[in-house]
Amino acid sequence: MTTASITPRTPAQGTPRTFTDVVRERTDALAERDAFVFLPDDGQGSVPEHLTYAGLDRRARGIASWLREHGAVGRPVLLLHPPGTAFVAAFVGCLYAGAVAVPAPLPTDQGQQLARVAGILRDSGASAVLSTGAYVPLLEAWLASVALPRVRCLATDREDIGDPSSWRAPDTSPDDLAFLQYTSGSTSEPKGVMVTHANLLANGAAIGRWAGTHEGMVVGGWLPHYHDLGLIGHLLHSLYVGGLSVQMSPLSFLKRPRRWLEMIGDYRVEGSGAPDFAYDLCLRRVTDEQLARLDLSSWRCAPNGAEPVRADTLRAFVERFSPAGLRREVFAPCYGLAETTLLVTGADPATEPTIRTVDAAALEQGVLAVGEGRTLAGSGSARDCEVRIVAPGTGAPLADGLVGEIWVRGPSVTAGYFGNEAATADCFGADGWLRTGDLGVLDAGELFVTGRLKEVIVLAGRNLYPHDIERAAQSADPSLTRGAGAAFSVRSGRADGAAGVARAAGAATEAVASTEAVASTEAVASAASTEAVGSEREHLVLVQEVRLAAVRGGDLRAVATAAQSAIGREFAVPAGNVVLVKPGTVRRTTSGKVRRTTMRDLFLDGSLTPLYEVLEPAVRDLVGDAPDTAALDTSDTAAPSNGAPHATDPGVSP
C-alpha cells in the first residue's frame, strides 16, 4: 500500500477518542481565532459572517443543552440549514449532545426535493429539526403537512438557546455514530450511511497524510454542507487540524463562478476541491478581464473527484489560469465515497496528475493497454486503506491491468446503512471489504476509475461507458451542455413476425445513416437481424440538455443529428435515440454525478418533456404515455445548468 510522504500536524494533547474530543481541544487552544467565514451573495450591505472557535464552542453548548433537555441524546437530529455559520454550530451542537446529526438540503417547492427530505426524515426517525429563524415557521408548516407535527423545530441562530454553562461532555465512544450521510445515489434510492467517530478520525488522518494539511491552513469551497466533500473535506477537516474554513453558497458559485476563484486569492486558500464540472464551468464563464484580477498562487491542492476526472479539463484549467499564479501540479485527482467516510485514493498533490492514453477497444473488453482512443486520469494510490479489483459477481481478485469492481477495506469504511440490513449486507462484507459498485483498474499501485458497474452499456459484446458517450455527443454542437447528459440502454423484445423484422431493419438503416458510422449493407442487415422474432436487443439512448439560445437557426433536428453522428464516428454503434431537453432536466446527486438510472426510469415512464426527440420504433413502444411535444413551450425558461446540478436556494439539488 502506498501512502503520501507528507505528514500533517496531528491533534495535540494525546490521541483523541472521538471527533468531539478533537473539537474541544481546538476550541480550547484556538479560542480567539476564526474557525469559519461565510461569504454571502454580492449585495448591498452584505458582509462576511465570522465565527471564532470560542463562539462556535459557546453556541454549540447552548444547542447541546436544548437537545439534551428534549431527549435527543443518541438519536438522529435533522439539520435543514441554508449555507452559513448556523449549520456548523448546529452540527457541533449535536456532537456536544451525543446526538446523531443528519445533514440534509432545505426542502424547496421542487417535488423531488420535498419527497427526498421527507424520506430522510422518516427513514432516520429524527427526533428534532434544527434550522434558522427564517425557515422554522415554514418547516413547522411542512412537518404538519407530511403528518409529522410532533417533531420539534429549533432556530439555531438565536442567542438564547439553552444554557451553555450547564453543558456536560457526553459519554461518547469511538464506535458511536457521529452523523448519518444520506446518499442521493446515482443508481439507487437514498440511504443513510452510518459514520462513526472512529471513521471520522481515521479519514481525517488519511486526508492529512495525503494533502499535508496543518494547523492554521485555510480551506475554502462552495459545495453543499450535506455533501460528503463539502461537509468533511471543507468543514470538518478544517476543525480536525485547527484551520480556517471559508465558504460561499453553491448558488453564488453557479451564478458567478469567478467568486470561487476570487475567494481563493482574497483569503489565501491552500486547499479547495470540486467535481470536474466546476472547473469546466470556470473555463467557460471567467472572462479575460476577470482572469487578469485573480491571484491563485496560494492554491496548492485542488482535489478533483465525484465524477469521472477528465484529462482535458485538467490541462485546459492549468493552461487558462496559470497566468494567475496557478501551479501545474495543483490538481490532485482522487476517489472516494460516503461509504468510506470520504477519501479512498488520492494523487500526490506535489506532482502533476498521471494521464494515460489507452487502447479504446481493449478497455471495452476490460483490459488496460497502451494505445489510442481513450485518455484516463489516475486517481492516485490507496490512502490508509486497501484497494482490490475483483471480478464482478464472483469477487475473485484480478491482476493489475484488468478492469473490475473496486473493493475497499480499512478503518474509514463505515458501519453500513442506517436501519437497512439488506442494503448493508449487499455492500458491506463480513470480512471488512466494501463492494463499491464502481469499476476501475490498478496499474503500478495507481487506481484508474472507469465507471459504475450498473451503468455500463453492453452493445455487441462491448462494454461502453456512458460518460464517454455523453462527452462525444456534447462535443458535437456548442448548444449541448457539457456534463448535462445521460446515456443508458433499454432492452426491447419483439415477437411480431416479419413485419417487426422489416420495421427493425428500417430503423437500423436510419440509425446507421444518421450516425455516418457504417455504410455497408452488411452492417444494416446485421443490425436488423438482432431484432429477429422473439429476440431481445439493447438500444442506446441519450437524454441531453440543450440551450435553445445557442441553437443555430433553432434547428434542433440538426443538433440531434450532430450528436448521433459524433457517437457513431467514435464508437461505431447506432445512436438512433436522442432526446433533447431543457436545462435543469438531467438529475444529479449532491456530488454532481448524473443519476442515469433515474433518467432511464423517467424516460421509460414517459415523464420527460422533450424539446426534440428521435426514437427507433422499438424504443418508442417501450416509452409510457409521453407529453404532447407539439404543445411544448420551447423557450429557455429553466435556469441553465451549465453542466452543474440544479441551482436552488440554498443549495444544490440532487
Image (tube, rainbow, N blue to C red):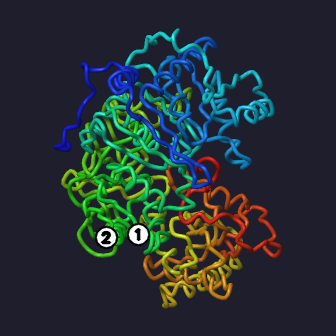
Residue on which disc 2 sits: 323
On the image, the x and y values in percent for residue 213 come to: 28, 41
Disc 2 and disc 1: Cα gap in Å?
8 Å
At mark 2, the secondary structure is: helix
Q: Earlier in the sequence, mark 2 or mark 1?
A: 1
Is 201 left or right of 3, judged from the image as shown? Answer: right
At mark 1, the secondary structure is: helix
- One can see residue 460 in this view: no
Type of residue at label 1? Leu
Q: Quadrant of the N terminus?
A: top left
Checking the image for residue 291, the label placed there is 1
User: Badge 1: few (under 14), some or many (20 or more) residues near its Cα, within 10 Å?
Assistant: some
Residue at image location 49% in from the left, 50% down from the top: 222
On the image, the x and y values in percent for residue 148 come to: 75, 26
Type of residue at label 2? Pro
In the figure, 642 relative to 249: above or below? below
Q: Quadrant of residue 321?
A: bottom left
Residue at image location 53% in from the left, 20% down from the top: 99
